[in-house]
Amino acid sequence: MKPHSYLANLNDDDLIEFSNNSLMKIGKLRKALKQVFNRDIEDFIKNFLRNEAIKIYPATQIYYPDGTTKIHQNNWFSSGVACKLLKLGNKSWNQGTIKIRVEVEFFPNEKSDKTININDVIDLNLTDFSDSLTIQSIVDDEFEQLRCQLEEL
């Protein structure tokens, strides 16, 4: 079973913006997700099962057919909880563990055909600015010529 994955394709210092324009570093969100999924949900599951009269002990002694035993720490998210499963149609129980694995991912919207590079935008703006200065210089020169002609009249 793969380990938990909390936005694994992102770095801790990457930023996420939510709909109300609030920003959060991925590392802070990742920390909250780990805490919620590892502790809060595990406590919720234990309490739910306890209310159903099912008790999960912190550790379970597992007996194997060859006569050996093993102490298993019951944790829903790391080692799993020891259990036996009887599938419909089977004649015997199958020993194992049940684990919860959490995966949180970011899925970008489909990329448009046009990718914007910030350097291109800066170059474009500088080119526009340079063109504007050139045009303004030409206009200023023509205005000066007209003013001189008017003074001569």
Image: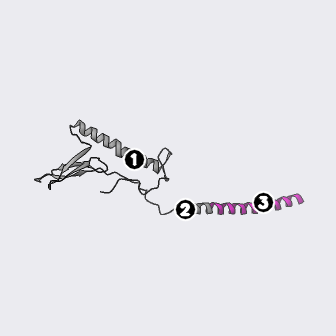
Q: Which mark is residue 117?
A: 2
The mark closer to the camera, 1 or 2, is 1
Do the residues bearing badges 3 and 2 touch, measured as CB atoms within 8 Å?
no
Between the C-alphas of marks 1 and 2, the distance is 32 Å
Q: Please tell me which residue lies in front, 77 or 134.
A: 77
Quarter of the image where one finds residue 153: bottom right
SS label for mark 1: helix
SS label for mark 3: helix
* In the depicted structure, whether residue 48 falls above or below residue 83: above
Outermost residue to the right: 152
Q: Identity of the amino acid at label 1? A: Leu
Q: Identity of the amino acid at label 3? A: Asp
Q: Which residue is mark 1?
A: 33
Q: Position of residue 150 (x, y in %)?
A: 86, 58
At 47% from the left and 53% from the top, the residue drawn is 12
At 41% from the left and 56% from the top, the residue drawn is 8
